[in-house]
Image: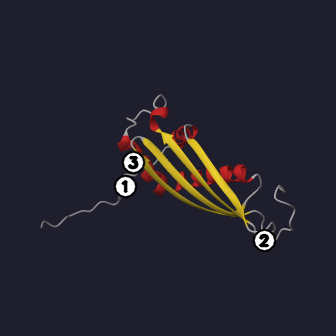
Amino acid sequence: MAAAKKIGLFGREIREWISPPALEILLGAAERITEGSFEGPPGPRQAYLGSIQLQIPLSACAEYLAEPLDASAARRVAELLRTDAKSREILLEVARQEAQRAAGCQLHELHVEIDSSHRGDTIIVGMDVEARVQPLSAGYGGRGAR
């Protein structure tokens, strides 16, 4: 093996992510199914357990996105939704908003599990939500208290 006389000063990385405007388009095209229920007696320990599913048909985004929107693109997007920190942050906010809308009240101490996959050119995002209806330190003001 030949010895190198000089080495590079800088490392390089090629990284791929979903652009924020593209993610906004994808989320805007999503069909949303949200369900949930309260667990436990009313009070500071009552929990909300919910599930949110987003189905995003890439074909619905074709007029806005430049890349071919096929099963390969859906696979790549599903992978990035699982691994890209910024995309996950945005999905967490979607989960919070959807869960609060379904619960009809503010939720606290949210814990969200996110999984994504694809079926053909459709991206499927599942989000399971666990949250408290009230902060533990707050007094009880009823389920609808905000």
Which residue position holds label 1?
13
Q: Is residue 109 visible?
A: no
Viewer-side label of 1, 3: 3
The 10 Å Cα crowd at callout 1, few under 14, some 14 to 19, many 20 or more, is few
Residue 111 in the image, given as x and y percentages of width and height: 63, 64
Q: Which residue is mark 3?
A: 75
Under tag 3, what secondary structure? Answer: helix
* Of 22 and 10, the residue lying toward us: 22
Q: Quadrant of residue 134?
A: bottom right
Q: Quick check: 41 left or right of 36?
A: right
- Which mark is first along the chain, 3 or 2? 3
**Residue identified by numbered label 2:** 136
The amino acid type found where label 3 is placed reads Arg
Q: Residue at x 16, y 67 (%)?
A: 3
Q: In the rendering, at what x and y percent does residue 38 appear?
A: 72, 61
Instruction: Check disc 2 and give the amino acid type.
Output: Leu
**CA–CA distance in space, label 2 to label 3:** 41 Å
Q: How many marks?
A: 3
Up-down relation of residue 138 to residue 127 (above or below): below
Percent across and percent down for residue 119 are: 41, 46
113 vs 65, left or right, is right
Q: Residue at point 78% right, 68% down?
A: 41
